[in-house]
Image (spheres, grey):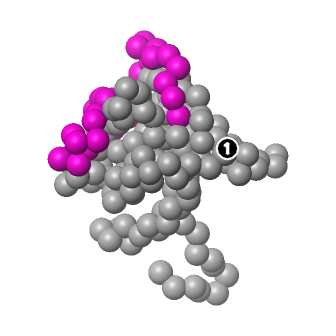
Amino acid sequence: MTYREGRFWQPDVTVATIVERDGQYLMVEEMASGRCVINQPAGHLEPDESLCDAALRETREETGWDVRLTGFVGAYQWKATETGRHYLRFAFLAEPVALVESRTLDKGIVRATWMSPEQLQAEMPRHRSPLVQKVIDDARAGRVLPLDMLVFVP
């Protein structure tokens, strides 16, 4: 998409949460474009919501887990080749706090599951985007910043 009079380019702003427990990662299987794909708990930032609050909300809605954010992994820019849409993803590291099994998961979510790094590698063709593996690789490499790197000014 090119700039047109009166319009400006704006990417989709999303959050993703990397939740690790005992060497496994909390992932979701979800339906996207007619196929079942693997992703972190992730979704779009809503109006008047901080990035941290969005990450907590999306994790809760897609997995049933309450988590505690422990770090900021980074901001990632990606263009989906299928749709041409641009995404700006803010990735967080978190630890699980409690599963609320009675929660209904978001529409399109098939299930939440824990996966080892080896399982994730084997399932790479099913990853929703290349960002799925990239953010985990960065977190595993210790590329984690303090949460106060992000400032929300209401």
Image point (41%, 27%), residue name: 21
| Residue at far front of view | 141
**Residue 14 seen from this side:** no
Residue 128: image location, x then y, percent: 31, 52
Instruction: From the viewer's side, name the closer residue of 70 and 152.
Output: 70
Residue 55 is drawn in which quadrant?
A: top right
Three-letter amino acid code of the residue under disc 1: Leu
Q: Is residue 29 left or right of residue 141?
A: left
For disc 1, the marked residue is 147
Region rendered in magenta: 94-123
Is 86 left or right of 121, judged from the image as shown?
right
Tally of marks: 1
Position above or below: 153 against 75:
above
- Residue 19: x %, y % from top left: 45, 34
Q: Is residue 22 above or below residue 38?
A: above
Say whether residue 75 is left or right of residue 122. right
Is 100 colored magenta in this rendering? yes
User: Measured along the vertical axis of the image, is residue 115 above or below residue 8?
Assistant: above
Residue at 59% of width from left, 34% of height from top? 69
Q: Residue at x 32, y 71 (%)?
A: 81
Residue at image point 49% right, 66% down: 77
Q: Quadrant of residue 125?
A: bottom left
Q: Residues within 10 Å of mark 1 (few under 14, many from 20)?
A: some
Q: Based on the picture, tell me whether residue 75 belongs to the magenta stretch.
A: no
Q: Which percent across, then down, holds residue 24?
A: 34, 32
Q: Secondary structure at mark 1?
A: helix
Asked whether, in this view, residue 97 is left or right of residue 120, the answer is right
Taking the image as drawn, is residue 16 in sight? Answer: yes
